[in-house]
Image (tube, coloured by chain):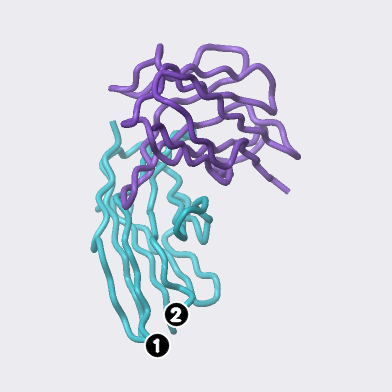
Amino acid sequence: GENVEQHPSTLSVQEGDSAVIKCTYSDSASNYFPWYKQELGKRPQLIIDIRSNVGEKKDQRIAVTLNKTAKHFSLHITETQPEDSAVYFCAASTNAGKSTFGDGTTLTVKP
Amino acid sequence: GAVVSQHPSWVICKSGTSVKIECRSLDFQATTMFWYRQFPKQSLMLMATSNEGSKATYEQGVEKDKFLINHASLTLSTLTVTSAHPEDSSFYICSARQAQGNNEQFFGPGTRLTVL
């Protein structure tokens, strides 16, 4: 089955700095890669996603890049703010819709 | 649009009892729903995939007789934790995929189960 690895497990940055979280996947059939932000005790919230026919996608301060050949994708958050502090999960999904999640990254943005 | 609800939001039960959790897609039809379990400070672990009108597909290591899933309609899936034990205490989250949509999943708010 699919295996998704996510790094780092924790990340601390100063407000205004950039944060980068990286994931790798193993199943070449995966074609949908969402990123979620989860606050304590709440549901995962989709913040950005990318499909396998695209190499990069940007939405304001958030961007995602995908390298299908290397089977890795990354989340980039620029100009970080304290409210960006949360746990971030990457996931890989096939057409069947079943998603495999990474282990999560706890991001702390220090004011 | 694409709202998913879960009920109850939290439940406390005694060991040995059964607990039913409902997952509803409020404004769309969901042919497929997914049930996840999340322990503190861990990732979401897929338990099973629930397909409307057919048997659920369970992930390896998940006991189908302990975690009963029923997906009786295009808007409702239920997870029943039978004979619950303290180690079943966890955050259970469902998600739904639109019948005519892409791969995007819409998550419910989760149910916090505590077994005493």
Q: In which quadrant of the rendered image does the N terminus of chain A lie? A: top left
Q: Foreground: B106 or A32? A: B106
- Kindly identify which chain the residue marked by label 1 belongs to: A
Residue at (69, 24) in percent of width and height: B74
The image shows residue A57, relative to residue B108, as above or below, that is below
The colour applied to the residues of chain A in this rendering is cyan
Q: Would you say residue B91 is visible in this rendering?
A: yes
Which residue is rendered at x = 31% and y = 65% of the image? Answer: A21
Tell me if A93 is positioned left or right of B52 in this view.
left
In the drawing, what numbered circle is on residue A78? none
* Residue count near mark 1 (Cα–Cα under 10 Å), binned few <14, some 14–19, many ≥20: few
Residue at 35% across / 24% down in the picture?
Answer: B59
The chain ID associated with circle 2 is A
Q: Which mark is residue A82?
A: 2
Residue at 47% x, 53% y: name it: A41
Q: Are marks 2 and 1 in contact (CB under 8 Å)?
A: yes
Write down the residue under mark 1.
Answer: A111
Q: Is residue A101 above or below residue B11?
A: below
Residue B57, visible in the rendered structure: no
Q: Position of residue A26 (x, y in %)?
A: 26, 41
The residue type indicated by label 1 comes to Pro
Local SS, label 1 = loop
For the image, the number of numbered tags is: 2
Image quadrant containing the C terminus of chain A: bottom left
Per the image, label 2 sits on a secondary structure element best described as: helix
Residue A60 in the image: x percent, y percent?
55, 76
User: Residue A82 lies in what quarter of the image?
Assistant: bottom left
- Mark nearer the N terminus (2 vs 1): 2
Observer-nearest residue: B56 or A78? B56
Residue A98 image offset from top left, x and y in percent: 44, 34
Chain B rendering hue? purple
Q: Amino acid under label 2?
A: Pro
